[in-house]
Amino acid sequence: MNQETSTNLAERIRSLISLLRHYVDKLLPSSIPRWFWYLFQWVALVVAAIGIYYSWQKFPQDVHIDPIYFSLALGIYVISFGMHILGWHALTRIFFGHVTLRVNIEAIAGSNLVKYLPTIAWYIANRSHFYHARGVAQKTVVVASLSELALMIGSGATLLISLWVSHWVPPFVVVIVFVSGLSTFIWLLARYAGHRSLKEFAYWLVALFWYGTSWPIGILIMWFIMRALVPINFDMCLTIAHIWLLASLASYAMSVTLGVFGIIREITFTVLLAQYWPITVGIAVAIIVKVILTFGQIGCSLILLGAIQIYRRLRTYQYKPS
């Protein structure tokens, strides 16, 4: 890649991120009190619950769920949830300096409660307000959050392209395409953010590892969901991988354009799965994925927030003067 091409690509990335940041900045007046976000989180939880309720009403009655494989899918999702936390923690070391893992967990968990509202802007705004109360500039949080989104989309797109290429070229070429694609992407992203030191680049690689590894974990979740509904073999993993990546990337792409979460993903799942299995299976998978992602994310977040509150009360009680 020559210097002119890389510069143009970096400018396009900068333009895209700046456009989304312009919309998010409108939601970040520092005068908004914290109680507003607590109230907003409760409203968001009600909206998410209503969405899940009406989605579950559409679940095909003739499709039966194997509880063992469903439980395995839910359990593996918890691993993916933890990977995203560690990925964000690595990004905060780049943008914010030294921030404890507990603070980052609280920020992610609190923001996840509003994640299923119609736009990504509320999710980023909630997170920005949280860190702003702890002395971090809101603009910095927005850039870090958009970098997180870019890492997810970039790593997933690179994996998808590599899987497509694998149909026509030898495995070692696939590895070269995958490594080259990720290296170019992470270099452009770090360059846009203005981080050029070796230590900062190391944190970029750590963040890329956690976010990138969550994609194969997601494919495994998809396989267990499919196995909970119909008999399948591991030779269908490549097909399932393509479907998971396409549907998830479509959802992320819609979030960048401030669209509605979930709807595009569900439609994509249903349409793609209908090419291989009955339409009822496609509908059932789309609904189960929505349930696992929504309840899993909100449930894990509530558990973590509760654990943090208990920890604080225990410390307060421990150091309370007698």
Image (cartoon, grey):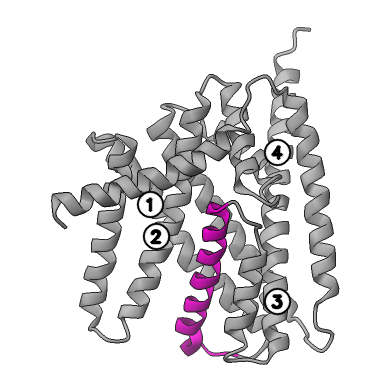
- Which residue corresponds to mark 1? 208
Query: Where residue 265 sits in the image (x, y, percent)?
Result: 61, 68
Task: Residue 155: give its label.
Answer: 2
**Between marks 1 and 2, how big is the CA–CA gap?**
7 Å
Mark 1 and 2 residues: CB-CB less than 8 Å, in contact?
yes
Mark 1 belongs to which amino acid?
A: Leu
Mark 2 belongs to which amino acid?
A: Ser
- The earlier-in-sequence mark between 2 and 4 is 2
Q: Which range of residues does the magenta coloring cover?
A: 232-257
Left or right relative to 168: residue 56: right
Mark 4 belongs to which amino acid?
A: Leu
Judge whether residue 131 is colored magenta.
Answer: no
Q: Residues within 10 Å of mark 2 (few under 14, many from 20)?
A: many
For the point 61% across and 57% down, which residue is it?
A: 78
Q: Residues within 10 Å of mark 4 (few under 14, many from 20)?
A: some
For the point 65% across and 58% down, which residue is it?
A: 261
Locate the C terminus and report the quarter of the image it occupies. top right
* Labels 2, 4: front one: 2
* Labels 1, 4: front one: 1
Quadrant for residue 161, please give it. bottom left
Quadrant for residue 179, please give it. bottom left
**Between marks 1 and 4, how big is the CA–CA gap?**
26 Å
**On screen, residue 278 above or below 27:** below
**On screen, residue 170 above or below 304:** below
